[in-house]
Image: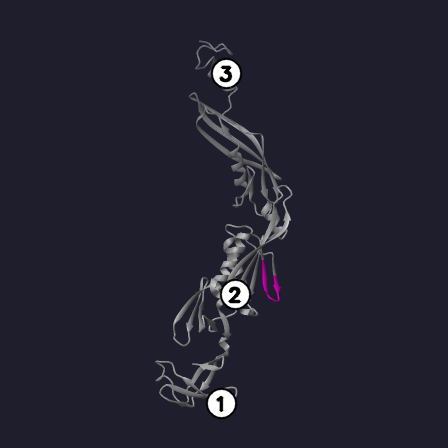
Amino acid sequence: MFCLECGSDNKKMVEDICIDCFLKNFQLIEVPESIDITICSHCNSRLEEGKWHESFIPEPELIYRALERNISINELVENEIIDLEIKNMRGNIAECSVEVMGDVYGEKVNEIYDVSVRILKTVCPTCSKIKSGYYESVVQFRAKDRDIKESEYIKADEIVERTLNKQYMNDKLAYCPYRAKLKEGYDYYIGSLRSGRKIANALKDEFGGVIKESPRLISEDRSTGKGLYRIWISVRIPEFELGDFVRYCEKILQIEDIGKNRVVANDIKTNKKYRIAWNDVEDIELIKKAEDIETVNIISKSPSKIQFLDPVDYSVIDLDVKDGLEDDVGIGDEVKVIKIDDYYLL
């Protein structure tokens, strides 16, 4: 059998032609002469197959990956070895070589291709939003019927910063472009709704309180006709604080703990503890602050009562001693009392 192209009859045949003639027009791989890759000039994220990928990859690695994605190996090639090299950089164009070695019908074949990779720099949608001060949520830090203390503002700022730093690993819009200090509290403008909700929950974990969301229509998507909303997230911390006295279910309680899910308070008459869910917080009435506790001196004592002078009008007050405390106090001792309604409590 002879080759239909060169007439040779003493070489390995591939169908109707010899192996040499076959390999003349055979390509180990297909690869374009030029390739474009798009990266963000701010965060170095890359655009691949219509999607932005945010993980940082150095430019040389991006070039190698672009070459790999665009190489198609002929199915007849076996034991292929591909060597990629960036030979020269001219501005934003990388001049590269792709060397391929492989076996085709038992023959060793080696080919080299020249490919240029052009790096196109633009701004990804996320960085574009950040540069424009874009935000999806506003976290409103408020207190019910009282002013927020400076120490609470400082703590809130720390919580917001810590939460955003943690969130940034998975959310590039975890940032705060603005913080507005209003008479009633702080407004934190947060890039993403997801991070805004994380911040609201973190504030509640620290201060307790109630979270409410309120969407506001800001515009309409012309292509879909759907409304575009921003979410206002209100975190309203309670009027009462640790040590304050409240009325709940006709009982007078002292606040012992404020948690993310409940308030723990102690009945000052029976010493019984109550755990009150935030859903029932509206039923809690603040009646006295912790700073309203006064220190008085005992002027007289009986087995079950003590006497002291009212700090305001210096009238003599008789007060029952709690069970178990009879032996702990004596004449001349200082005790702490609180006046609630028209009577004192020890």
Q: Secondary structure at mark 1?
A: loop
Name the mark nearer the viewer: 1 or 2: 1
Q: Secondary structure at mark 2?
A: strand
Residue 269 position (above or below residue 298)? above
Q: Amino acid at mark 1?
A: Ser
- Which of the two discs, 1 and 2, labels the residue nearer the N terminus? 2
Q: Amino acid at mark 3?
A: Cys
Residue at the spot of label 3: 21
Name the mark nearer the viewer: 3 or 2: 2
- In the image, the segment drawn in magenta is 180-188
Residue 315: numbered disc = 1
Q: Amino acid at mark 2?
A: Ile
- Which of the two discs, 3 and 1, labels the residue nearer the N terminus? 3
The crowd level at tag 1 (other Cα within 10 Å; few <14, some 14-19, many 20+) is few
The crowd level at tag 2 (other Cα within 10 Å; few <14, some 14-19, many 20+) is many
Residue shown at the point (52%, 19%) measured from the top left = 24
| Residue 255 location (% of width, % of height) | 45, 71
C-alpha span from label 3 to label 1: 121 Å
- Which of the two discs, 3 and 2, labels the residue nearer the N terminus? 3
Left-right relation of 252 to 144: left
C-alpha span from label 1 to label 2: 39 Å
Residue shown at the point (50%, 66%) measured from the top left = 282
Query: Of residues 168 and 205, which is closer to you in this image?
Result: 205
Residue at the spot of label 2: 237
| Residue 86 location (% of width, % of height) | 54, 36
Query: Of residues 99 and 262, which is closer to you in this image?
Result: 262
Query: Of residues 257 and 160, which is closer to you in this image?
Result: 257
Q: For the N terminus, which image quadrant?
A: top left
